[in-house]
């Protein structure tokens, strides 16, 4: 049952991805500009943790191989939340009506968030092989808060996921400095717990056994 629901959801996400690309293509053709093209790149970054978690579930790596892939997954997870902050770019951009851009941003943000939530779910299934329930909860909360902090680093400080490899010392210094700022904690807590709350909703839907996938419309 769980596998069928996941398969159903993944198919619907593919349809939503096609819709997002069609909306962006339509906007480009209508306006003759490349406005909001950054959404495609941000969506790709948001899909990276989902692709990684799917790979980890399928190949079942162990030892340092598993740790390394989980680390890269964690680095890219904030991108699934980050794209929500792209909503700040919404404003009238003639000749495209504002309602269309609102739909465009909402569609991309929803898809990115759902990819992140499903990725989170898949990694939790991996975690269940190695940790008891109590430890799982602690790890999930910690990862959610780190994801929220990662969104802050990206949106407010303009750091990228790969900066940990290209500029690790400056990034580490920035993290230490920001860790004492109350507004950074507030941002991280709000985004982190919002993500965790939505994850529990998705997890509950996946495990809901009183409906078949065909009835989830």
Image (tube, helix red, strand yellow):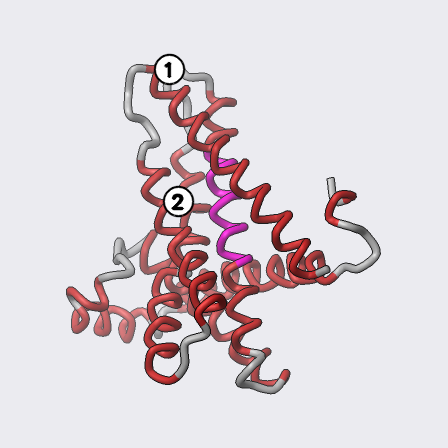
Q: Nearer the viewer, mark 1 or mark 2?
A: 2
- In the displayed structure image, the side of residue 140 where residue 1 appears, left or right: right
**Tag 2's secondary structure?**
helix
The residue at 16%/73% (across/down) is 169
The residue at 44%/53% (across/down) is 80
Q: What is the magenta range?
A: 105-118
Q: Position of residue 203 (x, y in %)?
A: 65, 62
Q: Could you tell which of marks 1 and 2 lies nearer the N-terminus?
A: 2
Q: Nearer the viewer, residue 58 or 193?
A: 58
Please tell me the numbered disc located at residue 41.
Answer: none
- Structural crowding at the residue carrying mark 1, measured as other residues with C-alpha within 10 Å and reported as few (<14), some (14–19) or many (≥20): few
- Structural crowding at the residue carrying mark 2, measured as other residues with C-alpha within 10 Å and reported as few (<14), some (14–19) or many (≥20): many
Q: Nearer the viewer, residue 95 or 50?
A: 50
Please tell me the numbered disc located at residue 94.
Answer: 1
Q: Position of residue 2 (x, y in %)?
A: 69, 61
Q: Position of residue 92 (x, y in %)?
A: 41, 22
Q: Is residue 62 magenta?
A: no
Q: Quadrant of the C terminus?
A: top right
The residue at 55%/43% (across/down) is 13
Please tell me the numbered disc located at residue 43.
Answer: 2
- In the displayed structure image, the side of residue 139 where residue 42 appears, left or right: left
**Tag 1's secondary structure?**
loop
The residue at 50%/60% (across/down) is 119
Q: Are marks 1 and 2 in contact (CB under 8 Å)?
A: no
Overall secondary structure of the magenta section: helix
Residue closest to the far right? 210
Q: Position of residue 93 (x, y in %)?
A: 37, 20
Label 1 and label 2: CA atoms lie apart by: 24 Å
- In the displayed structure image, the side of residue 63 where residue 133 appears, left or right: right
Q: Quadrant of the N terminus?
A: bottom right
């Amino acid at each position: 049952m769980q596998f069928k629901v996941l398969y159903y959801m993944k198919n619907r996400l593919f349809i939503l991805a096609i819709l997002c690309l069609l909306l962006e293509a339509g906007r480009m053709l209508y306006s003759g500009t490349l406005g909001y093209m950054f959404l495609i790149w941000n969506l790709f970054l948001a899909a990276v943790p989902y692709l990684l978690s799917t790979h980890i579930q399928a190949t079942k790596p162990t030892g340092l191989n598993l740790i390394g892939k989980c680390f890269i997954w964690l680095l890219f997870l904030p991108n699934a939340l980050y794209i929500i902050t792209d909503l700040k770019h919404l404003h009238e951009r003639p000749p495209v009506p504002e309602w269309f851009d609102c739909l465009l941003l909402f569609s991309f943000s929803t898809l990115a968030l759902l990819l992140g939530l499903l990725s989170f779910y898949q990694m939790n299934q991996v975690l269940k092989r190695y940790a008891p329930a109590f430890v799982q909860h602690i790890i999930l909360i910690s990862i959610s808060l780190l994801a929220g902090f990662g969104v802050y680093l990206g949106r407010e400080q303009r750091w990228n996921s790969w900066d940990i490899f290209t500029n690790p010392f400056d990034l580490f210094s920035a993290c230490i400095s920001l860790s004492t700022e109350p507004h950074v904690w507030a941002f991280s807590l709000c985004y982190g717990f919002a993500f965790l709350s939505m994850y529990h909703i998705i997890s509950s839907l996946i495990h809901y056994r009183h409906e078949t996938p065909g009835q989830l419309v």
